[in-house]
Image (cartoon, rainbow, N blue to C red):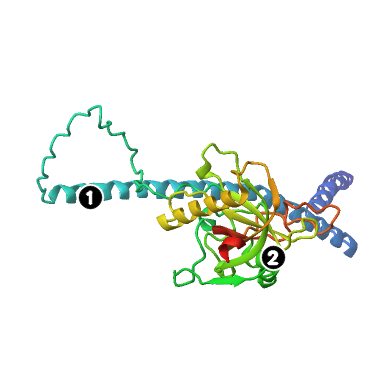
Amino acid sequence: MKRRFIWFLTVLFALVPLVTAAQEGTSAPRRTSTSEQKLSQKRKKHKSYRKKSHKKSRKKPRKKLRKKSQKKHNRKKYISKKRKHSVRSVARRSAVVATRPTIAAATPAPAPPPTASTPAPSKKRKGAQTHPKLTIPPPTGWRANVRRTVATTAAGTVAPFESFSTLGALLRTLPDQGEVRVRYGIYPGVKGQAPAKRFDQERRNVTVTCWLHGVRYDSASADENDREVQLLVGTTADTATTTMMFARIPGPLRGVGAALQDEFTIAREQLADVVGERPAPQWHWIPPRQVAVEGGLFFNGLRDPGIRNDAQRDPTRPLTVWEITPVISVTPISLAE
């Protein structure tokens, strides 16, 4: 019996640790508290958010690179298609041209060799336009071609001549300078906006009795016919109180018609009889002489008007920019009567 009891105890002591170890390995999961569960969920969320954002940041540049590569690929396709189309169209055109009937052109006669009298023809550039030779010379001043012609109506006929007994009466009928500048955009230094033809306020021809104070050429050109003669005419014979105005006789240049050329020449001869000598590039002051000036009205807006102050007033800078241009007749009053 003792032996059996001892054997039983040994077996029991040997089995107890084995049973406890088996129970510990297959034990049920330990219950966690709510706080621990929340903390674990937060950690999971945080980890998943970081993973997602990290994945997105990696994918963005890849998408851009894919789009760029796709655009390049599409562009290459379009260029290749375009080249194929152009090659096919050229081939079709060449085939059509080859099938058209050809017309035998007449063989041109051989050109005669250039002689001393006939100069050799110059080589023209491809696409160059040939213009006919113009008889009108290039303008030598602002609106030069306009002020070389008398005023005409809208219908193209010469405007009737209005007669004024004094220069002051003519000045009172002229439009305001500021309104004309604003309406037509004519200012000093702005040449591109000036009208190429006479506007409505300039379509007037006048014959006015005034006092001639000075004359000069507008330039020092060697050819007298190319020079424009400027006249300073005033309302009275008193140089200190008179109101001045410019009048101009153009040179007898081409492009204005034979009749106007003759009238300009006659006006110069009449002025030479009144003054007694030829004008010079500087102002030549003469004793005031009463004359009858005939010509058209012209708005010389490129010129600055003078100053009204008597102490600073320059007689060679009239207050008005309106002028009598062109002058076709300068007649002394004694001869006119």
User: Few, some or many C-alpha atoms within 10 Å of disc 1 (few <14, some 14-19, many ≥20)?
Assistant: few
Name which residue type carries label 2: Gln
SS at mark 2 in the image: helix
Q: Mark 1 points at which residue?
A: 93
Which of the two discs, 2 and 1, sits closer to the camera? 2
Q: What residue type is labelled 1?
A: Arg
Report x, y in % for residue 118: 25, 32
- Along the line of sight, the residue nearer the viewer: 42 or 21: 42
Foreground residue, 91 or 13?
A: 91
Residue 285 is situated, as x and y percent measured from the top left of the image, at: 70, 47
Coordinates of residue 302 in the picture (x, y in percent): 65, 54
Q: Is residue 255 above or below residue 128?
A: below
Q: Splitting the image into 4 quarters, where does residue 32 fall?
A: bottom right
Q: Is residue 309 left or right of residue 181?
A: right
**Camera-side residue of 135 and 271:** 271
Q: Quadrant of the C terminus?
A: bottom right
Q: What distance separates the C-alpha of mark 2 from that of mark 1? A: 64 Å
Decide: few, some or many residues near mark 2? Use Cα within 10 Å; few <14, some 14-19, many ≥20. some
Query: Is any part of residue 288 visible from this angle?
Result: yes
Q: Earlier in the sequence, mark 2 or mark 1?
A: 1
Query: How many tags in the picture?
Result: 2
Mark 2–mark 1 CB contact (< 8 Å): no
Q: Mark 2 points at which residue?
A: 177
- Residue 81 vs residue 315: left or right? left
Compared across the picture, whether 114 is left or right of 324 comes to left
